[in-house]
Structures are given as C-alpha cells and as structure tokens.
Amino acid sequence: MADLDQAPRVLIADADRWSADLLVELVRNARCDARLEVLQDSHGVLEHCRDGWPDLLIVDYGLPGIGGLELLREVRRQRRHPQVPFFLITDRVDAASVRAALPLAPTAYLAKPFNAEDLLQRLRNLLLAPGQEVSCPLPSASPRQSLEEYLAEARESAAGAPLRSSVHQALERARQAHRLELDELEPLFYRDPQLTGQLIAAANSAAQHLGNACQTLAQALGRLGPRHSLNLALGLVLQRSINLSDPLLLPYGERLWNQSQRTAELARQLAQCLEGDAVRCYTAGLLHLLGDLAVLRSIQSWRDLGGEALTAEQVEAALRQHAAPFGSALRTRWRLPLELRQLIAAAFHLDGGVYSKEGLILHLAKLAAELPDGEDVCQLARHKAARMLGLDAGLLASLPQLAVNG
C-alpha cells in the first residue's frame, strides 16, 4: 500500500457503468481524495498500468478481454511486496471458481451482489490508517463561470435529478441503522423519479440478462434483485448534491416532485378505466419532469461549488431554457427504452399521425395535473386527447382521481 499521507490511486474496472458508478461513490466516501481511474476492459487496464500498478484495483471477474481472474494473475506475477490490494467482484461462487482464485490471494473475493456497506467498511480499513481522517473541501467554481455557462456544460454529463426529500431521509435513516431492506423501502422507490429512472436504466444495461426491455420499476427490481437494487439506491445517497439544500430550490423541487406524482397517479387512473397499460403510464408520468429536476440539481451543484445566490426569476428562467434539453439528454444517456421515451414525450406534445392510447392518456393526465386548484376538470373534455379517447365531461367528472385536484 502506498504512503497513506498521499492520495491513493484506485483503479476500477467494470464494463457496467451503473456498477462502476456505485464503486466510484463507495471509494470516494471511504477516501474522498482518492485518485480514481475507471476502465471498461482488460486491455485498457494493462495499458494504464504499463508504468506501474495503482494502490488498489477493484475488478469485475467478467471484465471484457482476458477477464478479472487473469488480471489478478498478472498482478501477482509482479511479486511486489507488499502485494497490490486486489478486490475481485464476481458472480462465480462455485467451488471450482473459488479454488482457482484463492492461490492468487485476492484481497477480497466479493460475490455479486455484494453488500455495499460491508465493502465501504473494507475500503475505509484499507485506504485509511487507524484514526486517520481526510477532509476534502469542495473545489470552487470558476469566478468567471456564470450559471448559464455551468448549465450549458453540465447538460451532457448531469447525473440526473435530486432524490425526493422524504426518500433521501428514509434511505439515510435505514443506512445509519444498518437496515437496508427492500420490502421496507420499495414503496418509497415508486415515488421517486431519480430512483425509478436509474433502476430502469441499470436493469436494461448490457451487464444484465438479455430479454425484453424493462419499462417499469417492478420489472427493473425483478431483474436487478433486492441486493443490487439497494446497492444502487445507496450509491445515490452517497452522491454529491443529491439533496436540495438551498432554501430557494427546495420549494421548486417539492412542486416538481408533487406534480410528477400527481401526473403519474392520474395517468394510472385513466389507464385503468380505459383498459390501457396502467403501470407504464404511471412510470412515464413519474419520469416526465426528470429534466426540470436535473436542472435544479445542477443549480444546487453550482451553488455548492461557490456559485452566487440566485433569485426566483433566475431559477425559473433556467428551468424554462434548460429543462427540455436536460431531460432529452438524460433519457438518451441512460438509454431508457425507446417505447418509454416516446410515452414520456407524449406528455408534452402529440405528434401528427397515429396516436397510441397510452400516449393520449399521458398527455391528458399532464393537462389535468396542471389545472389550478378549483378549476373544473370537465373542461378537458374539449381537448383533442379526451375526444380521441371517448371521454366526455360526465365521464371525466366520474373519475375520482381526476375530480379532485391537489
């Protein structure tokens, strides 16, 4: 191990971006000044390490190329003393695979899905000396970089939305109590756009089993499994600027979260009455304001980096200008299924041509969710979407979720 007075070099090698992102957050939480490198194949690791091995390698067994086990073998051929720490993460827990790895003395042989809290503690034990604390103040934003410039740069790399306040608090409480159990936390997942979107994206990654695309949270949880789903949720909690702490931004977040939830519930209610896909409609409704929320999180990040205090007018202008491109970029970067992206887009506009039932439902649900308090929902009967769905004023008034706004 390198001198712990210096920032350690940590190399993460995993082809799945969601698993790699989780490992990055765990390392940063254990040792915030760690110098991180993330690679996606064995060849890249060997090239990177040509001039010297890092202080810690965290490698997936199934890494493209020669694989994690052969990388471990190559590291051990160096005969360094002490040995380079090497965490091998694997879904191979059969006796033969374990016997093949043990002679190479991996520092840790972690079965997928690993326990993220346990791994975090292992990383702290390895990267910190007993009693050592490392403080990492946030870098300052460039004094010449305006919010507009910052948002323009952040659009293509933004991590997504902040976690809903109640969800963030519940996850943090469960983490502190060491009681991260999916059956207790799952109901909260269905209320949070960031968690829902990210878990769907992770479930559709190349690292998961091939098959039909996951378009709902229930499908994603089934494919990822309880432990990996909780690991990804924990990774979110550890991310920077994941909660809105600026007093000006929090009311905007609450409004957008509530509007997302409202649209999702209305879409589900309409779909149930019209024999549409209620679960997909709920999911699309929950995700349709991801772009707005991602802009708020980026503003929070800018403020955390030393950006000046803003006015409500500046926040509203940023949302008007950047919400749509942020949302489009995020859904594309996450590679959400095309059918789900099209359904989300239908909430905002109806393209010419053939309309799907679910697209019309989403569009109408968004309109209903945006009605001011006390406004008559029956006025929506005149809208094109309502007419195409065969919803007259009497039918709209009879739907309990639509009849009450708020």
Image: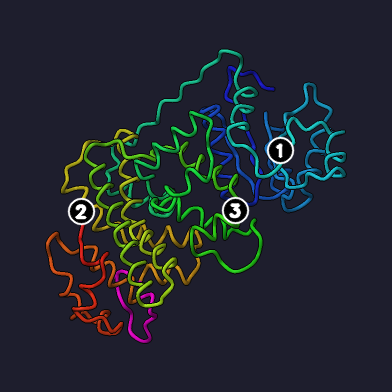
What separation in Å lies between label 1 and label 3 (alpha carbons)? 17 Å
Q: Quadrant of residue 405?
A: bottom left
Coloring applied to the structure: rainbow
Residue holding disc 3: 224
**Which residue is under mark 1?**
110
Q: Which residue is mark 2?
A: 317
Q: Residue furthest bottom?
A: 353
Residue positioned 27% across, 66% down in the render: 366
Q: For the residue carrying disc 1, how many other residues have a C-alpha within 10 Å: few (<14), some (14-19), or many (20+)?
A: some
Which residue lies at the image location 36% right of the left edge and 77% below the top edge? 274
Q: Is residue 48 left or right of residue 138?
A: right
Label 2 packing within 10 angstroms: few (<14), some (14-19), many (20+)? few
Tell which circle, 1 or 3, labels the residue nearer the N-terminal end. 1
> From the viewer's perspective, is 162 left or right of 12?
left
Residue 62 at what x, y percent from top left?
Answer: 73, 50
Chain-order first, disc 2 or disc 3: 3
What stretch of residues is rendered in magenta? 346-359
